[in-house]
Amino acid sequence: MPPFKDEQIIIIAPGSETTVAQLGLPESFTPARLRVRSRMFPAEKEGEWEPYKVRRRQENPAAKAGDAQNGVSEGAAKTIVDGEEDEIQYEEDRVSEEGAVWPLQEGKIVNWSCFFALITHVYNTMNPPFHTPILLIAQPAWTPREHEKLTQFFFEKFKTPAFSVMDAALATSWAYGVHTSTVIDVGKDKVDITAISEFIPHTQGRIVALPGCGGEALTQGLLSKLKSKGLNRAMCEQLKKNAICEMLPVGVPIPGTSDSGDLDAITNPAAAASTGALGSGPAAASAIGNIPRGPGADTEVGDDLNAEDNEGVLDVASIVAGGRMEEYIAKIDKQKQEKATAPKKGAGALAAQAKAVKLPNSKREKATFMYEDHALLDTLKGMNLGTKGMADAQAALDEGPQKKGPEVTDGADGEPKSAVEALEAGSATSRTGPIRREIEVGPERFQAGSGGVLEKIADAVHRTISSVSEVNKRSELWDSLIICGNGSRVKGFKDALLSTIQARYIISPSSATIFTSEIPSNISTPTGTGANTPQPQLGPHGGSSQVNPLLLAATTAQNPHLMHPGNPLMGLSTHNSHSSHGQTPTSIKLVKPPEYFPEWKDVGFDESAFLGAQVAAKVIFVVDQGQSKGYMTRPDYNDQGPTGIHDYSL
Amino acid sequence: MNISNSTTAPNAGEYAGDEVSAIVLDPGYSTTRAGFAGEDVPKSVCPSFYGHIDSDPPHYLFGENAIHDPLGNLQIKNPWGSDGIVEDWDTATKVWEYAITSRLTGNRPGDPTKNGLNDGNANGNGEAMDVDMEGLENLENMEKPLEDSPLLMTEPGWNSVKAREKYIEIAMEEWGTPAFYVQKTGVLAAFASGKASGIVIDVGASHTSVTPVLDGMVLKKGVQKSPLAGNFVSNQIRMIFKQAQPEIPLTPHYLVKTKTPVDAGAPAQATYKTYDIPPLDSFRYNEEERVLTEFKESVVEVWPGPGRFTNGTNEEIAKSLPGRPFEMPDGWNQLFGSERYRVSEGLFDAGAALQDADNPRPKDEHTIPRLVQAAVQQVDADQRPLLLQNIVVTGGSTLLYKFNDRLNYEINTLYPSTRNKLIAPGPLVERKYAAWIGGSILASLGSFHQLWISRKEYEEHGTNIVEKRCR
């Protein structure tokens, strides 16, 4: 078999929300070129699937004529004329997701035929030549049996010459180039947490598909807070992706609440008495920097938005569907005009607005974002308005580009998000794209994690690392956390998660331990009288001036011990080996992302599993050429069948 | 092809290649281990505990993620009885099934799309992916989780006849396995260390057992068990906390929102979490157990000898040794001195165990040295030296620091004239999963082929066949 070349390699990484893939490895590794929403639409015939929504449409002759020049949906939409009946037309709607089937749920493959159709679609889109090895990134939730099924599928459907499966968490650690790490992969509906030591994932204790913790949970968290204000799920989803939605670290107060709102402020009176500080812990520390903010100038801006807001957040789709569209459009028009005149009212308002803009998002009480109303578009499409009516309605309803909303949020749309969004944003600029409206939200936007998402993840991280039986490896695992996955894209998520973990699990240097664990015990310690004991470095919890009686006990305890040097079982060497049995973690850190991938730096390392897969693909297919059984070849498959994959995959 | 030498793996055909998909299930009180035969570690290690919400219909939750999620009114239960034999068969079946399906086969019963595809795939041609959706309803009833995998299960040495028959009944009727075998954990643990004869000391969560194995057969009358194991040590730790002045509060992680560093011995300053509908006490107990496990890993030490902990000046020496600190989830921390020896001493010396009203003094004959003694007693005198040369130590609780030193001391005191050798595998997975690993080795041996009880035999002879065939 001729050796594989870089440009022949296919990498596919399916996810619950997005499946990414690429044909060929570029010189410098780039984020995946092909991004597909992980969903298919059931075709007419059961068991067959279409990549796009196919709408059945009754054509009226007039629109039919116009159809040839400007397609009703995208220019790319092709109409399939049904053989029997000329009147029934089918059009592909590339934006709509109505009736879609998502074959991956919580990382598990729940609908195999749909999943296979998705993979086939991805494969065909890349249009690969023959002799393409395939590397599949596997979700941790996939079982060995499912790996076999996939192996069979890839060999028999695509006749691939070589195939390998790589665990997503392992791929992530390859991307970061670290041998020991704890990978926290935040997905759509689930979180996977894997402890990897020396490139070997600990399968026994890994947390697979922790439900209710992914990006969807954050959306639901926003929804639960904003439902009363009339926002629906789709709005919250887009709000979550917007830069104004942010998760604040533990102890950072939510703007508008004068005190730290999410903390119940149980600051210990005892601590206040002894340390003289107002409170204790990170909450108090951050409270010091917390300048109380009353309703400032920015609310003024918000005020006249509010009037519109009352209408704006309503479910426009249902109004339109209810046939009151004209009425609504008229209202919108009126508001638009008012709005246009508003800035003329006075320079003062403008200045106030500009001032508000300068404040960082986390300090502002209110912010607005552009909402792309897909549901409304779908409703319009379903109304058979015809080409002209459709365009008119869209123009009337769209508040997007022609209106200059608060500048801050406008730019946020183009924020470096995942490439999907960039792609979608691109399509949105076309006139037929989704209808945009402006929505303002208050401090609720900081409460995406209010459902306890971070706590759940933090607890799972603790369980994962605690399940590693080699106690001495744990502290290294705590020191190398990797938070990845598109669910963690929400602004501030990583910091908030890290601070949650730290607030709950970090073991602070105990005042009783400084002589037993910090100093090697064979170095003689200060004499036990406490007279020449150095002032203990009590660190965060401020020193008490008296000598701690426990310290005294700890130091005096050393002496008789040193008087029994003859006892081999109590030798110092054995003691030192036990010192690795100390509790963990004493520190918690994130791994720094690799710096030598410029293309990845721009978009962030949330999909680093794909980067790792590129590295791995290069190594196993090109460098190693199968010598260390990094992949399964077709002859291997013919010999051993699907079960052989376990001998080959990484 | 590779030229085989000592370092290359054997070809699939060398071992029973057609049996590689056998599944080995090693259920225990704390965890249930499952995996494919021929692999070196079980791929699936699931807690044997399960969640139960009393509602109508009752709601059961399985798996690591579910049992640590503080849901309202959640209680945590365990299907094992206090005698080391499964008590609640219905949920035990579900727990085990979860261990197999969640991480190994993924073949969830009642998931029609998957089941349908299995059959489509079996055709093996490229068009197989076009599943026919007809007949899925029929398939759903028929599909069972283990339809195409033989199953090797492990059982404790004292398992009752009834329990063994229940094992095969579950495997055959509920899971539809084509072939089944059950083997005692003691034999398998010995196999994992490459021994056909020896004494297996297995200190688990709920029970400690000592099993004499001769030529791959368990000497049934020599099997000893006692409840002095991991859970006993946990209870001892709880008593230390309770009897301390002032009492040491044991707050599990799920109740703590954030903690703040405090001085040793000072009351905790943490922000706590409250739940509208809190989980029930058994949930808290199970979460406390996590803290105790951490305590065992980082603080508890077995008095290594010489002499017992309570003998002579040993306690004084222990007091003088540097203590080890422990920080609770709520930030409370303290140095533990000689107590940390005390909690594990009961395993070896019943008199040294802490006692209170709920925890009476353990029986003398339940301590590990007495168990070993009783087990060896049942063996022919001329076989004893052979057994004592192969003392296999396994089970999670043997990972207590210095456990082996003490065990070695105790056995040498009991049998000063023989050459006694402890075999305690260094790699921790081998120590924890020895019985499973032994099962994995056994089930992948070509010669094991003939031992399987086939479905046909089961149908012919009924559950009783397990008594005849699995000795």
Image: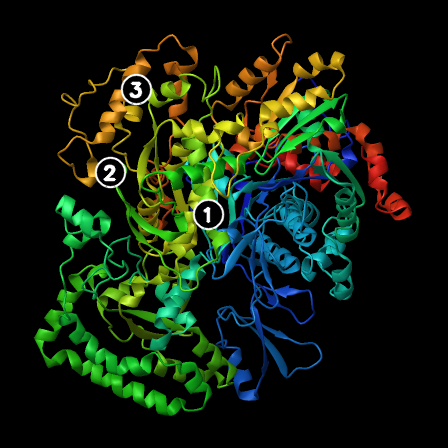
Which quadrant, please, contains the C terminus of chain A?
top right
Looking at marks 1 and 2 on the same chain, the residue that comes earlier in the sequence is marked by 2
Helix or strand or loop: what does disc 3 sit on? loop
Q: Are marks 1 and 2 on the same chain?
A: yes
Marks 1 and 3, Cα distance to the nearest angstrom? 34 Å
Name the residue tied to disc 3: A520
Quarter of the picture containing the N terminus of chain A is top right
Mark 2, other Cα within 10 Å: few <14 / some 14–19 / many ≥20: many
Percent position (x, y) of residue A59? Answer: 58, 84
| Quarter where residue A351 is shown | bottom left
Which one is nearer the viewer's eye here, A152 or A474? A474
Which mark is drawn over residue B287? Answer: 1
Q: Mark 2 points at which residue?
A: B263
Residue B448 pos. (x, y %): 80, 30
Amino acid at dot 3: Pro
Looking at the rendered structure, whether the residues under marks 3 and 2 are on a common chain is answered as: no
Q: Is residue A27 visible?
A: no
Element carrying mark 1? helix
Asked if A264 appears above or below A577 in the picture, the reply is below
Numbered circles on residues, count: 3
